[in-house]
């Protein structure tokens, strides 16, 4: 018998083609795998298997190594050349290292030894199917990138980003002050630029001042300007950034780092729409939209007396929260593909995308540095890549070696069970990590008032949980 095929009710995404010149082995695998939810076709002819693959209804191939007409390695090589989207698992009674290396070299996803152990085979097939699904998702996202999914420079198709796009569209046409919050590296300045670009002031200037990068003694002069002779080096009068941004947008980045001495002066400027230059004797009106951004918890800063409450309320008229990368699902791969295209072009390298295994590592990593860290990661990977796809070996060690550290609180082993107090402590810490150390957000998630949360954090020492922030030093223009 050259080939045997059995039509069954097909389960989408779980269709296995078994290839073995031993008909009894094929029949045995069909019964075992069908009972576990797989759709199984089988054939004793490698040539018939290749014809079957042409129909496009196969999700994974399971082939024997030793066959009379064609070896499993030859079949695998031909499948990879014709249908690289279909993973191939090789079965062999000769489970040596040399065999494994030979199988991988011709493109096999994995190999398994005979006699086949059902549990091990199911695990291998499930992983192969997940690999295929992830590869398909990577290709889909590459097409999405090509279609320019997103808002301007913002890229993403997750629910969190769709919500952000909708909010930007509604806020952009207003002239109201906006406070953009989010962890370092999430793209707060890009959001501010998008608000400016989509608003009625888009033809005016977009002026950036980093409140953390300029000395307090100079920042007042930079913002409000100064009169001639106001200080030693003030040989001539100079307009401040509020005036330079006239007709456009003034973006106050890292507003949480603004010195307390300057906070009442900024508040007055926002309320009166006028500024008084350092050493000046008159108020000068300005016409700008103010957008501020911070990665700090301003509500906590207000409680601790480090930030004026009235200034906080004046800035926080409309609040835009930028989601961290770990909350954006497959946007990680979408952004990674955008960065691959960008950096491959800059470096004149023929790197066109990610391998499925590399994409899987990117999705598993929590990205504490958010989009900025991902961009650095991909820039490095493009520089190291030797093929047309970024491989796992091209990724930084922190991404390659990351393993989830979730604590399992339920166990049948009584020695592993913990007290309710410990459950609470672990959960609070997990929420704190999820919101990037933002205690006001954590309090809202936990349903606690901030003082109660602070007390619980202080009790177990978690009040020292901090998020590392890499500040950019940029002179305003």
Image (spheres, grey):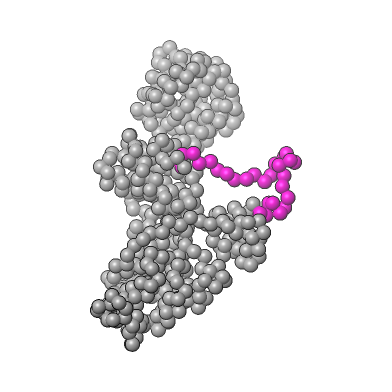
Q: Given the current orientation, which residue lies at the most extreme bottom position?
A: 281
Please tell me which residue is depicted at 43% across the width and 48% down the height of the picture: 332
Say which of 275 and 344 sits in front: 275
Image quadrant where residue 431 sits: bottom right
The location of residue 293, given as percent across then percent down, is 43, 66
Q: Which residue: 38% across, 64% down? A: 213
Determine whether 393 is above or below 174 in the image: above
Of 86 and 55, nearer the camera is: 86
| Whether residue 378 is situated above or below residue 42 in the rendered picture | below
166 and 359: which is toward the camera: 359
Q: Residue at x 34, y 75 (%)?
A: 221
Residue visible at 67% across and 46% down? 409
Residue 295, position as x, y percentages in the image:
47, 62
Q: Which residues are magenta?
A: 399-425
Is 411 colored magenta in this rendering?
A: yes
> Where 207 falls versus 144 (above or below)?
below
- Residue 307: percent from left, percent from top: 50, 72
Q: Nearer the viewer, residue 235 or 152?
A: 235
Give the quarter of the image for residue 415: top right
Quarter of the figure with the C terminus: bottom left
Q: Is residue 104 magenta?
A: no
Q: Position of residue 397 (x, y in %)?
A: 45, 40
Q: Is residue 200 visible?
A: no
Evaluate whether residue 413 shows in this view: yes
The outermost residue toward the top is 68
């Amino acid at each position: 018998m050259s080939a045997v095929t059995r039509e069954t009710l097909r389960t989408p995404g779980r269709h296995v083609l078994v290839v073995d010149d031993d008909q009894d082995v094929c029949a045995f695998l069909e019964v075992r795998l069908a009972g576990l939810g797989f759709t199984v076709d089988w054939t004793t002819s490698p040539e018939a298997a290749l014809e079957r693959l042409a129909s496009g209804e196969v999700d994974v191939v399971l082939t024997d190594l030793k066959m009379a007409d064609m070896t499993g390695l030859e079949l695998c090589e031909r499948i990879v050349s014709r249908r690289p989207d279909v993973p191939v698992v090789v079965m062999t009674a000769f489970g040596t290292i040399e065999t494994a290396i030979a199988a991988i070299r011709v493109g096999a996803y994995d190999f398994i030894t005979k006699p086949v152990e059902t549990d091990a085979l199911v695990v291998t097939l499930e992983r192969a199917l997940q690999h295929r699904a992830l590869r398909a998702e990577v290709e889909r996202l590459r097409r999405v990138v090509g279609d320019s999914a997103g808002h301007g420079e913002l890229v993403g198709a997750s629910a969190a980003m769709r919500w952000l796009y909708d909010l930007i569209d509604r806020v952009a046409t207003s002239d109201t002050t906006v406070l953009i919050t989010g962890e370092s590296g999430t793209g707060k300045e890009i959001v501010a630029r998008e608000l400016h670009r989509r608003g009625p002031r888009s033809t005016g200037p977009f002026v950036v001042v980093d409140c953390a990068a300029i000395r307090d003694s100079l920042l007042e002069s930079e913002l409000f300007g100064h009169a001639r002779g106001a200080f030693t080096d003030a040989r001539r009068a100079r307009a401040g950034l509020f005036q330079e941004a006239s007709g456009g947008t003034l973006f106050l980045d890292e507003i949480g780092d603004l010195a307390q001495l300057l906070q009442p002066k900024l508040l007055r400027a926002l309320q009166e729409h006028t500024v008084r230059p350092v050493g000046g004797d008159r108020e000068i009106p300005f016409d700008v939209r103010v957008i501020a951004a911070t990665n700090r918890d301003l509500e906590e800063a207000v409680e601790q007396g480090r930030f004026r409450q009235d200034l906080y309320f004046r800035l926080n008229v409309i609040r835009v929260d930028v989601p961290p990368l770990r909350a954006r699902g497959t946007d990680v791969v979408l952004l990674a593909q955008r960065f691959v295209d960008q950096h491959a072009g800059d470096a004149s390298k023929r790197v066109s995308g990610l391998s499925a295994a590399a994409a899987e590592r990117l999705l598993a990593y929590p990205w504490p540095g958010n989009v900025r860290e991902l961009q650095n990661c991909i820039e490095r990977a493009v520089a190291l890549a030797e093929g047309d796809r970024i491989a796992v070996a091209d990724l930084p060690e922190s991404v390659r070696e990351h393993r989830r550290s979730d604590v399992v609180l339920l166990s049948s082993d009584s020695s592993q069970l913990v007290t309710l107090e410990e459950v609470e402590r672990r959960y609070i810490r997990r929420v704190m990590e999820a919101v990037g150390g933002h205690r006001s957000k954590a309090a809202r998630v936990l349903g606690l008032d901030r003082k109660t949360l602070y007390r619980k954090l202080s009790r177990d020492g978690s009040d020292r949980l901090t998020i590392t922030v890499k500040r950019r030093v940029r002179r305003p223009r």
